[in-house]
Image: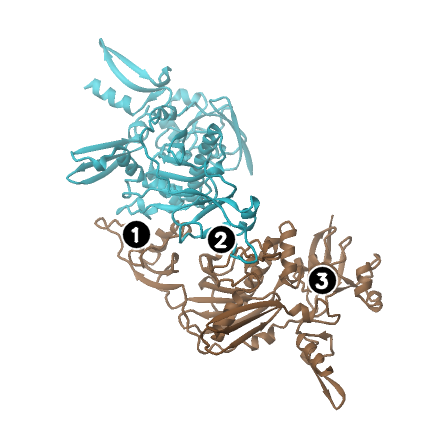
Chain colours: A cyan, B brown
Amino acid sequence: MNFKINFLLSTGRQSEVTVEEGTTLLEAAARAGAAVEGNCGGKGTCGKCKVRLTEKSTAAPTETEKRLLSAEEIAGGWVLACQRTVTDDLTVEVPGQSDAFQRKISLTEDDGDIEAEPVVRKIELTLDPPTVKDQTADLERLLEQLPRGLRCPHRLLTGLPQKLRQEKFSVTAVIGPERLIEVEPGQTGSSLYGVAFDIGTTTIMGSLHELASGKTLAIGAATNPQNVYGADVISRITYASTNDGGLERLQRKVVEALNAIIGELVREAGIAGDEIYEAVAVGNTTMSHLFLGVDPTYLAPAPFVPAYRRPEALEAAEIGLAINPGGQVVLLPNIAGYVGSDTLGVILATGLEQRRDRCAVIDIGTNGELALAAGGRILTCSTAAGPAFEGAQIKHGMRAADGAIEAVQIVEDEISLEVIGGTRPRGICGSGLIDAAAVLL
Amino acid sequence: MNFKINFLLSTGRQSEVTVEEGTTLLEAAARAGAAVEGNCGGKGTCGKCKVRLTEKSTAAPTETEKRLLSAEEIAGGWVLACQRTVTDDLTVEVPGQSDAFQRKISLTEDDGDIEAEPVVRKIELTLDPPTVKDQTADLERLLEQLPRGLRCPHRLLTGLPQKLRQEKFSVTAVIGPERLIEVEPGQTGSSLYGVAFDIGTTTIMGSLHELASGKTLAIGAATNPQNVYGADVISRITYASTNDGGLERLQRKVVEALNAIIGELVREAGIAGDEIYEAVAVGNTTMSHLFLGVDPTYLAPAPFVPAYRRPEALEAAEIGLAINPGGQVVLLPNIAGYVGSDTLGVILATGLEQRRDRCAVIDIGTNGELALAAGGRILTCSTAAGPAFEGAQIKHGMRAADGAIEAVQIVEDEISLEVIGGTRPRGICGSGLIDAAAVLL
C-alpha cells in the first residue's frame, strides 16, 4: 500500500512524495529532495535526522528516540526520520538547514593565474563537397583534416551525412585526445565550455569555464544528496554494498546534484548545457567511486583497496551527466583508498609539488587530508574530520550553517559567541568546538 | 482505432498482430514476421506481395491490382498487401515462400584451410591478492598483467572488484586490440567463440566458429526481413530516408534477424550467446550502413557517397547484437558506394589479390559485383542482379525457392523444365530465365 508524505521545508516550499508502506521517513525525505541530515546513515546513533510530525503520531517513541531526543522534543511531535516507517499519509516539518555553500563560494573567487589546458578543442573546417571524381566517404573526408588516429564513436557516425550537409560541408569538429566528440554544423569555434567539480562528502562545488581562456563564468554549489545515506564515507560504502540497488541510487543522487548545479551555471552564463564538452571532477576516493557507480565495497576493510586509481575518462552519456552527451568526463587519479583526487587537486592548486622547503597542506572537510612535501617526495594521509567534530559523537554538533557557533571567546570573564548568520545558536560546528576547547584550557 | 490481423502462414503456423487503422497489410505482415515479398518496397509496381483475404473484401480492387493481378486472382480474394490499408479485423493467407537458404548453406560447407586470426583473445591470470603492503588498485593489478595501453570501458570497471574476488583473484581477461572486453571469474580460456555474417539484401548467412582453431561449429541463414521495405538497395535507402523512424526500423529488423540466427547457432553448438566475443560482418555498402543504423541517404544520388568506408569496430551492446554485450563487432571496409565489404570478402576468399594472371570473380546476388585482377591492381564494379532477373520487371519472376524453374532445356523438340523442390512451377528464377533465353535463340 502507498501513502503520501508532504514535507514542509524551511524555505516555505512543500514537497510531496508517494512511498510504499514501511519506507522510512529518511528515505521518503531523500526521494522528496527534502534535506534531512542523516549523519549515521540510518543506524539510529547520531540523532541528527529530527523532523516534526504536524499531527502527533499514535506510535510510541522508540528506545532510540527516547535516548536521543529530549522529553520536550518528543512532546512537541519531534521524531527521528530514520526510526519511523510510513504507515499512513503524513505531513512532516523539516527544520531549517541552509547550507554552508554560500560561505564556501566566497573562498573560490580567485581564478587569477590559472592557465587553461583543456583536453577538448574545436577545429573549424570547410570541406570540399564530394564530386563524381572525388567520392571519398563522409567520415574519411572529415578525418583527413583532423589529427591522425581519432576514433569515431558509433553514435556520431549514424547522423554524420546530414550534419556535413546541413551547412554545405562547413562544420566544426570537437575533438578529445583520442576520439571525435561531436560534429557541429557551421563555424562554432568561439563557444567551448567546461565545468569543474569538487565532489565533497557533504558539499559539492561546481564552476563553469570558458575553455579557451580558462575564465570562470559562474560558480554554484549544493549539498551532496547522498548525505541521507550517511554523513561519512564509511556509512556510504556500507549503504552501497549492503542494499540492493544502493550503489546505483548513490550514483544517481550525486549525478542529479551535479546536473542541478550545471542547470544553475548555464542559466547564469546564458549558454546551453550541450555547449559544455568537458567536465573535470575531483573527490575523495569513495566519492569518485560512487560518482562513476563503481563498487566501493573493498575500500572499507583492510587492506583498503580501491577499484581503480588511474585517471578515468568517459562519455557524459555513460553516467547521465547533463553536458553534451558525447562530452569528455575526466576524473583526476586517486592517490590511495583514503586519499583521493581532491588531494591531488589541493597539491596542484597550492604548487606543493614545486616547493623545495618542507611544507604541508591540510584540507579539512568531512574528511581531513594532509600532504607533506619533504626530501623530494610528497607523503599524504587522511582521517575523519567533519562528522567527528560536527555530528557523529557531539550532541549539539552541526555543520557550519546558519545557527552554528563558529567562534568562542572569553571577554572580561563573559563567554562571547559568534554565530553563523547572526541568529540564535542552533548548535556548534568544528571551528567553534576547537575555539571552545582552547578558551576553556 | 486498432485492428487485429491474423496471418495464416504456409508452414501451418499463425501470427497475429494488432495495428492502427490505415496501416498497410505489407507493414502489418512485417510486424507479424510473416514473409510477404515486397520487391518494389510498396510502390505498387512489382505485384509480388500477393496475399489472400479469407473473407472477400468489400473494397473494390485498386487500379494497380487490376493491372497486376489476373481476374481469377481477384475473384479468388487475392490482393496486393501494399495496396490495402487496414480498416477492419482480418484473416490473411500468405502463400508459401520457403527460402533459398537451404541451397545456399550447401555451398558453404568447406572451411578447410582457413587460418583463424581472431582480434579477440583470452588470457588466464592468477593475480596476487592485495595486502597491506601491496595496496595496488584492482584495475591496475589486472592491467599490469596485460598488454600495455588497453582501455577499460566504464561498464566493466563498475563491477570489477566482485569479479576479481569471486574466484579469489583467478580470472580470465578477454581482450581486443584496444580494449578490455570482459573479465570472467575463474580460468575460462578454453571457450572462445566468434560469429561471421554475410548480410545480403535478400538472404543473411551466419556461421559460428571456435576462435582458437577457426573450426566451424554451425551454419544458419534467414531471409533479410528488410525485404518487405523493398527488394533492392535503392528501395531500402528510399524507405530509410523518407520515412520517420525508417532507418531505425530497418536497423532493428536486420539485427533481429542476426539475433535469430545466433539463437539457432548457439542451440546447435550447445554454447551460450555470452561466450561469443567477436562478430565479423560483410555486406554491400547499403546493408553495412543499415546494419549500423548509419544514414544511407547520399548513397542513392550521384556522386553516390558512403557515410564511411573504413572498417568499423564497436561493442555489441551499441547495436543490440545478441553476443556478449561487450563483444567486438567488426565490419570489413566498404570499397565504394555500390561495392561493399562482401566483395572484399569474395576477393579474400578466392585469393584474387594474389593472382598474377588476369582473373575475374563474379558474385551474383540481389546485387551483382565483379572484381577484375589485372596489371597489379583490382578493379570492381556492380549492377542490380537478383530483382532484375527475378522480380522487378519479370511478370512470373521469382527467387530461387521451391517452385522456381531453374533450368530449361529442349529435348527432342519438347521443352523440359527443372523446378526447385520438384514441384509444379510457380515462377521462374534468374538461372531459369537465362537458360530459357539461351535455348530459344
Q: Which residue is mark 1?
A: B140
Foreground mark, 1 or 2, reads 2
Q: Residue at x 29, y 25 (%)?
A: A430
Q: Which residue is mark 3?
A: B7
- Asked if B133 appears above or below B405 in the picture, the reply is above
Q: Residue at x 67, y 79 (%)?
A: B421
The numbered mark 2 sits on a residue in which chain? A
**Along the horizontal axis of the image, is A173 left or right of B258?**
left
Name the spot of residue B27 as percent of width and height, x first. Answer: 69, 57
Amino acid at circle 3: Phe
- Between residue A213 and residue A12, name the one nearer to us: A213
Quarter of the image containing the C terminus of chain B? bottom right
SS for dot 2: helix
**Could you say which disc has been placed on residue B70 in the image?**
none
Q: Residues within 10 Å of mark 1 (few under 14, many from 20)?
A: some
Name the spot of residue A285 as percent of width and height, x first. Answer: 32, 41
Q: Which residue is mark 2?
A: A141
SS for dot 1: helix
Amino acid at circle 1: Glu
The numbered mark 3 sits on a residue in which chain? B
Amino acid at circle 2: Arg
Mark nearer the N terminus (1 vs 3): 3
Mark 1 and mark 2: Cα distance apart in space:
38 Å
Q: Is residue A440 visible?
A: yes
- Asked if A310 appears above or below A35 in the picture, the reply is below
Residue B104 image-quadrant placement: bottom right
Foreground mark, 2 or 3, reads 2
Q: Residue at x 67, y 68 (%)?
A: B387
Residue A420 image-quadrant placement: top left
- Between residue B413 and residue B55, name the one nearer to us: B413
Q: Residues within 10 Å of mark 2 (few under 14, many from 20)?
A: some
